[in-house]
Image (spheres, rainbow, N blue to C red):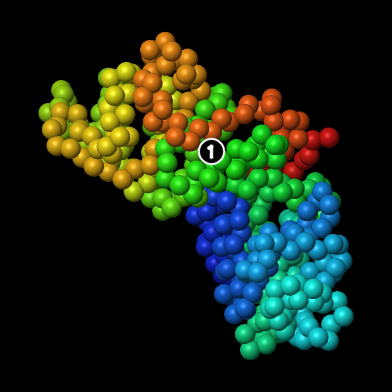
Amino acid sequence: MPLVASEQRNSLLQSVAGLLSKQVTLQRLLDSMVEVVVRSLDAERGTLYLVDSSKGRLVSISAKLPEMDRIVLEPGRGIAGHVAKTGEPVVVPDTTKDTRFFAGIDEKTGFRTRNMLVVPVRRTDGTICGVLQVLNLGRGNLGKEQLGKLENLADSVAEALSLTSFMPAGQGRKGVELSSPFNNIVGTSPAMKEVYRMIESAAATDVTVLLTGETGTGKNLLARAIHHNSARASGPLVQVDCAGLPAGIVESELFGHERGAFTGAERRVEGKFEQAHGGTLLLDEVGDLALPLQGKLLRFLQERSFERLGGGRTVKVDVRVIAATNADLESLVQRRLFRRDLYYRLKVLRIEVPPLRDRGSEDILSLAEFFLERYAERHRRPARRFS
């Protein structure tokens, strides 16, 4: 690959590298990519369409398009539809002179498209999964150099998409299966759509969240999705496994300790609450906390302050708490094993995560194919599909 093309591809991938491993919304990830493309080509607008494999239509997954939420084009319609159908890149120096141009979008938005560069987005096996276009390039520069740059960027988009939870449609089929609004979280069942709605609500606020559900349902992934899509996303996300810590050190682990607080405490140590300052603290298996520690946690949730073990100075921190458990906390409350007041403080917003058996066969197949594809890529094996 020529050096310039390699630099262009790396530029886009580097710009979104920090998001690819996180449970950010796919919208945020794709918007970041389109923004890089628009800047790179000095264009006024850009659009990334993906081919919805279930209906064969082009859907604008990301666009600098404030006037409309989404564009849907039938196969073959407009320049983008033509590129998706033929796989040929198209240069349009003057849209008024190209009969393939669909003016309906401009009529709805009031934007005037003067020129366009449009290229296919292909998976590694050559099948088309989308279309990338830029509108109104600076100085009308639509030469081979600009087209080549857009094609290189489209290759980067395809590579980035392969690292997300957008599912390929299957060998030889165009398009992708649009799974969930969050990267690395798979599922389209009604039960999961309700979970996504609540995750988005939680991310938009700063309230304490309680995630409940059986082991293996993905509570930690969803907790990360809340953090990475919240106003605290730039802050730390600190996780504590309340079940995995010996009872004798849980308090020190959470709240820290002063020098001399116990044998071997040779220096002051900050606890997880201080480490999470400005971000989010995830208390996993919170139902396993001992009753004395439940009291200290309750005080923190009420006052946002605590004392380190062996210390008398009050420490205040700015931390959002997300708790997760597979235990029936209501039952523990009834049995006096969990504080009722703490339970109500934790469940300001409660999200029940459904087990896979309640999500339907489509989610089971989607998850199986997601992991099959990931492990095939990791071990450099041919991609396969379940029959």
Can I make out residue 101 in this image? yes
Amino acid type at circle 1 is Leu
Residue occupying image coordinates x 71% and y 81% = 112
Return the residue nearer the eye: 195 or 265: 195
Direction bottom: furthest residue: 139
Whether residue 92 is situated above or below residue 370 in the rendered picture: below
For numbered disc 1, what is the local secondary structure? helix
Can I make out residue 5 in this image? no
Give the position of the N terminus as an image quadrant: bottom right
Residue occupying image coordinates x 72% and y 80% = 113
In the drawing, does residue 233 fall left or right of residue 295?
A: right
Return the residue nearer the eye: 345 or 141: 345
Report the label total. 1
Q: Residues within 10 Å of mark 1 (few under 14, many from 20)?
A: some
What residue does disc 1 label?
221
Return the residue nearer the eye: 205 or 2: 205
Whether residue 94 is situated above or below residue 317 in the rendered picture: below
How far across and how far down the image is residue 222, in percent? 53, 38
In the drawing, does residue 64 fall left or right of residue 290?
A: right
How far across and how far down the image is residue 299, in percent? 28, 31
Whether residue 11 is situated above or below residue 340 in the rendered picture: below
How far across and how far down the image is residue 10, in percent? 56, 64
Residue occupying image coordinates x 84% and y 82% = 98
Direction top: furthest residue: 335
How far across and how far down the image is residue 17, in percent? 52, 56
Give the position of the C terminus as an image quadrant: top right
Quadrant for residue 95, please give it: bottom right
Quadrant for residue 118, please give it: bottom right
Residue occupying image coordinates x 71% and y 36% = 189
